[in-house]
Image (spheres, grey):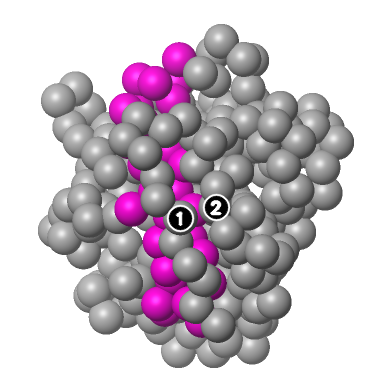
Amino acid sequence: MSKSIPPVPAGASAGAILEAGVLAAGGRVELACSFSVEDAVIIDIIHKSGLAVGVFALDTGRLNEETYQVADAIRERYGIPIHWYFPRHEAVEKLEREKGQYSFRESLENRHECCAIRKVEPLGRALAGLSGWVTGLRREQGVTRKDLAPIETDEANGRILKINPLLEWSEQQVLDYAGQHNVPTSRLYGQGYRSIGCAPCTRAVGPGEHARAGRWWWENPEHKECGLHRR
């Protein structure tokens, strides 16, 4: 059933957006956590607000070691369980048996196939039974995210609510909050990474490059989504 989207005043805080979204969802809400600095900041805000928002994560099988380290640090720091979802092993075995380990670099179609197996299908299971989910999406991250709203109906996932509390935050605001509140973050950020996904699909970026230039760097900017945020 479609949820009613509450109005979000201009300049509303991340905490206010979260509270309004959770209230409107009227049921179980969880954060989709990739252990980015954005997601870690949201967990800190949730923890301080006392909102009943769970946390789930997708283990694609290709994550950086540093991502697992942040996951453990967050679990210990905030005393919260993390609900992990894995891809179907049969699908991964078939993909690698037939196309090898790096088929995703051969074509956009192949990359979408890999993301569908490792991310999109597990996300569907993670969202089953939820009334809403929270993301760390920000508008300035790229052309694919310019039309988002702080709270919106997720048409691609059963018309549950999708809550984007950091949508209008800048990268610097996120980093400043993380530093001021001692939020656990990946050490990869100190090595030139500004957006972190699967290890083979992520690299550090150079001076003057866009923050997401290191994600699927062989593709055009308008293609730089994995399918988790279909519209």
| Identity of the residue drawn at 55% across and 47% down | 20
**At numbered mark 1, what does the secondary structure look like: helix, strand or loop?**
loop
Q: Nearer the viewer, residue 142 or 212?
A: 142
Mark 2 residue crowding within 10 angstroms, few (<14) / some (14–19) / many (20+): many
Q: Tell which tag, 2 or 1, sits nearer the viewer.
A: 1
How many numbered discs? 2
Query: Which residue is tagged 2?
Result: 21
Q: Is residue 205 above or below residue 223?
A: above
Q: Nearer the viewer, residue 74 or 115?
A: 74
Report how far apart the C-alphas of labels 2 and 1 lie in the structure: 7 Å
- The boundaries of the magenta stretch are 149-176
| Identity of the residue drawn at 75% across and 48% down | 52
Please identify the residue farthest to the top as the structure is shown. 180
Mark 1 residue crowding within 10 angstroms, few (<14) / some (14–19) / many (20+): some
Q: Is residue 123 magenta?
A: no
Q: Is residue 54 above or below residue 11?
A: below
